[in-house]
Amino acid sequence: MASPHYFIAIPVPFSFQSLFSTWQKQLREHVSYKQWPHQEDLHITLKFLGPVADTKIQSVTELLKPIEKINAFSVKVGNLGSFGNQINPRVLWAGVEVNKGLLELYNKVEEALSHVGFSKENRPYRPHITLAKKWTGVPFKTSIDELAEKFKEKYAFDVDHVVIYKIHPEKSPKYEEIAIFKLKRGDLAGSIN
């Protein structure tokens, strides 16, 4: 039997799950995708692990404990964007601004996991919140550029924990929290820079 798939991510807080779920409902009127993530599954990926044996996931959990020494921080999210061809992009997302706190967290996760055989990512980090993926082939009623003009609000939320998720492809929501790492609480004021 194949090992389950896992990834490490920042969960989207509940109030923002509702916000982006509303974006998804509005977007469905203009674009056609096979997958619209459940609002409880919305997240900012730090590292996709793929299939991992139960014994190895315990090592991953141990290696990630030091990230709890990182200070909690805020991120700005919003602005609609896409990956792939602008006529039929494969992914629609809400953007996440890279800042010092997010980059520190990402780099610590990459570094920790390199000790148990996970290759470091060689592309620049492009944080985002996936809203839809797998285009159906039905032409868009509205262009991506026009949609981006309608969904350009930005918001900020606090990042105070990180989660290892196990993927259950047949369920909805499909991500199960396996381990939670609480970041150090400090003064979050002004931490968006």
Image (spheres, rainbow, N blue to C red):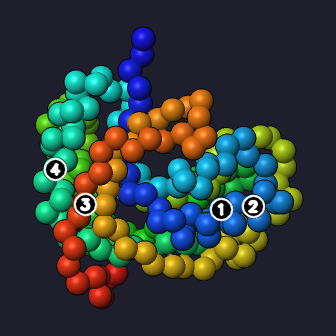
Q: Position of residue 27 (x, y in %)?
A: 75, 61
Spatial separation of the CA atoms under disc 3 and disc 1: 25 Å
Spatial separation of the CA atoms under disc 4 and disc 1: 31 Å
Q: Tell whether label 2 touches label 1 (CB within 8 Å).
A: yes
In terms of image quadrants, where is residue 105? bottom left
Seen from the viewer's position, the closer of residues 149 and 115 is 115
Q: Tell whether label 3 touches label 2 (CB within 8 Å).
A: no
Residue pushed farthest top?
1
Spatial separation of the CA atoms under disc 4 and disc 2: 37 Å
Of the image marks 4 and 1, the number of the one nearer the N terminus: 1
- Rendered residue at 38%/52% (across/down): 9
Residue pushed farthest bottom?
190
Disc 2 secondary structure class: helix
Of the image marks 3 and 1, the number of the one nearer the N terminus: 1
User: Can you tell which of label 3 and label 1 is closer to the viewer?
Assistant: 3
Question: Total number of numbered labels?
Answer: 4
Q: Position of residue 133 (x, y in %)?
A: 64, 46
Three-letter amino acid code of the residue under disc 4: Lys
Three-letter amino acid code of the residue under disc 1: Ser
Three-letter amino acid code of the residue under disc 2: Lys
Spatial separation of the CA atoms under disc 4 and disc 3: 9 Å
Mark seen at residue 21? 1
Relative side of 138 to 127, left or right: right
- Mark 3 lies on residue: 182
- Mark 4 lies on residue: 65
Disc 1 secondary structure class: helix
- Rendered residue at 69%/56% (across/down): 86
- Mark 2 lies on residue: 25
Q: Tell whether label 1 touches label 4 (CB within 8 Å).
A: no
The quadrant of the rendering that contains the C terminus is bottom left
